[in-house]
Image (cartoon, rainbow, N blue to C red):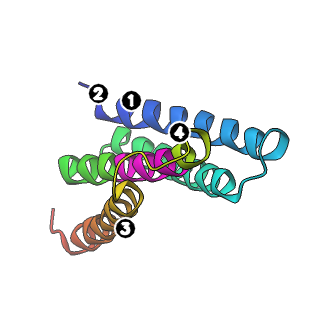
Amino acid sequence: MNLSSLVMTIAALQGAGGVSLAAAAAHVDANPLLATASQFLMIHAAAGLGLGARLGAGAPLPRFLAGAAFAMQAGVTLFAADLAARVYLGGKLFPFAAPMGGGLTILAWLALALWGAATLLRRD
């Protein structure tokens, strides 16, 4: 399986979802939850594209980097989906979905910091 392509495909879908939610927030429902979900998806879509490109370029510790990328993508998707559910479904996706998604996203960013530090200290 090509992890780089998978990370980039998920990122592209997140970007499309983010733009769609931005359009909905601007033209259908001005609920700030939609704007927040949109911003998170688009920002992390860009991060996912960068991570996918780095994986494709032969990153050191590629499985760790891919794991952090997938954790980030899962976390931000869960967070944004919960915010959208609150607007469109009238309630939470499930209890603690947004905090769990946000927490996973934060942990993924910390894992990326750890990956960066490990690659700095690596002796190849």
Q: Secondary structure at mark 4?
A: helix
Q: Which residue is mark 2?
A: 2
Q: Which residue is mark 1?
A: 5
Residue at x-position 38% and y-position 64%: 99
Q: Which residue is mark 4?
A: 14
Q: Which residue is mark 3?
A: 106
Tell me the mark number nearer the camera, choosing from 1 and 3: 3
Tell me the mark number nearer the camera, choosing from 4 and 1: 4
- Earlier along the polypeptide chain: callout 1 or callout 3? 1
Distance (Cα) linking label 4 and label 2: 19 Å
Q: Secondary structure at mark 2?
A: loop
Distance (Cα) linking label 4 and label 1: 14 Å
**Residue 14 falls inside the magenta stretch:** no
Distance (Cα) linking label 2 and label 3: 25 Å
Residue density around tag 1, few if under 14, some if 14–19, many if 20 or more, within 10 Å: some
**Residue flagged by tag 1: what amino acid is it?**
Ser
Tags 1 and 3 in contact by the CB under 8 Å rule? no
Magenta stretch bounds: 72-83
Depth check, front residue: 51 or 124: 51
Q: Is residue 96 left or right of residue 19?
A: left
- Earlier along the polypeptide chain: callout 4 or callout 2? 2
Q: Is residue 26 left or right of residue 113?
A: right
Tags 2 and 3 in contact by the CB under 8 Å rule? no
Q: Position of residue 120 (x, y in %)?
A: 27, 72
Tell me the mark number nearer the camera, choosing from 2 and 3: 3
**Residue 75 falls inside the magenta stretch:** yes
**Residue flagged by tag 4: what amino acid is it?**
Gln
Q: Main secondary structure of the magenta part?
A: helix
Distance (Cα) linking label 4 and label 3: 17 Å
